Amino acid sequence: MTLSRFAGRVAILSGATLGIGLATAKRLGQEGCKVVISSRKQKNVDDAVDYLKDEGIEVLGVVSNQRIKEDRHSLIQQTCAVFGGFDCLFINAGASPHINNLLEITEEQFDRTFDTNLKANFQFIQECVPYFVKRGAGSIVTNATAGVYGAIEILAGKHLLLYTWSKLCLVAMTQHISRDCFDLNIRVNCVAPGGIHTQFLEGGADMPSIKKLFASIGLKEGSPSSRFGEPEEIFSTVAYLLSDDASYVTGNCIIPCGGYPFNRVL
């Protein structure tokens, strides 16, 4: 069965040139959506645009750092200039620059984590609301982590708690802001994935490897599902929340986690 839930719609996605973001852009495009993908690096944007165009998807790529106000505004304005507006927003970019004892966190690490994972999400939503109002409706999804429901403490002790603090605040912010958006016909939800095979899990030039941390403390690639997840196992949840299929869903957090015992908040 071919779905067309997003025919005639436009979606902006941040952190969308790899992993969950790119997989979601592909899924939305396959369902008829015009997608605007963004990330900080030009090469990543160019490669992702080429990949999506090869899949027959109408796509615009924009270099944009989610933390920078001017970049977010440029992303919005370029989207409106090319597509006339937008209907969906997936805020996927995140940062986890610290893995260690909490007392060793630097001010720069603290600021970068909360600026990217919380402040920029809130500001991006604020900035997009007037454009959704012009369209008559809108749908927003933020990206937290299943760790806010206990996984990081269970699996990695105190090592990832700076990241988890910021994501716990993100879940609360998403739930609270959804109330103010409700009367504007804008839905705001959150997805909180478990451990997913992405560059984020592997680490990068400016981020340590979470996967290596898990290995160092004895975590195997295991859960009741006996493995880490794949980006393609998350995009359908995001697509559902952005679509009219979730018209009665707002202020919620869905946790695709492979069966870890996420039964409590830290």
Image: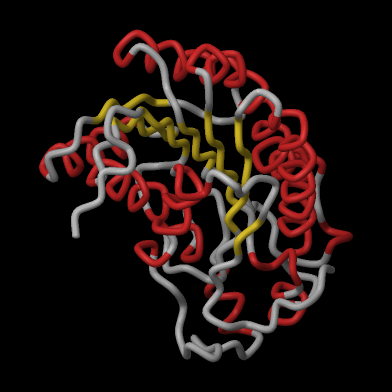
| Residue at image point 35% right, 11% down | 84
Task: Give whichever of 74, 174 is nearer the camera.
Answer: 174
| Colouring rule applied to residues | secondary structure
Percent x, y of residue 244? 45, 42
Percent x, y of residue 21? 41, 47
Percent x, y of residue 254? 60, 61
Q: From the viewer's perspective, tell me whether residue 137 is left or right of residue 122.
A: left
Task: Give whichever of 251, 217 is nearer the camera.
Answer: 251
**Above or below 61: residue 108:** below
Q: From the viewer's perspective, tell me whether residue 261 is left or right of residue 173.
A: left
**Above or below 152: residue 180:** above
* Quadrant housing residue 43: top left
| Residue at image point 71% right, 53% down | 167
| Residue at image point 60% right, 66% down | 255
Q: Quadrant of the N terminus?
A: bottom left
| Residue at image point 74% right, 69% down | 149
The residue positioned farthest toward the front in the image shown: 248
Q: From the viewer's perspective, tell me whether residue 104 is left or right of residue 223.
A: right
Task: Give whichever of 189, 153 is nearer the camera.
Answer: 189
Percent x, y of residue 129? 61, 20
**Above or below 228: residue 43:** above
Task: Give whichever of 149, 86 is nearer the camera.
Answer: 86
* Quadrant housing residue 47: top left
**Above or below 254: residue 34:** above
Q: Quadrant of the C terminus?
A: bottom right
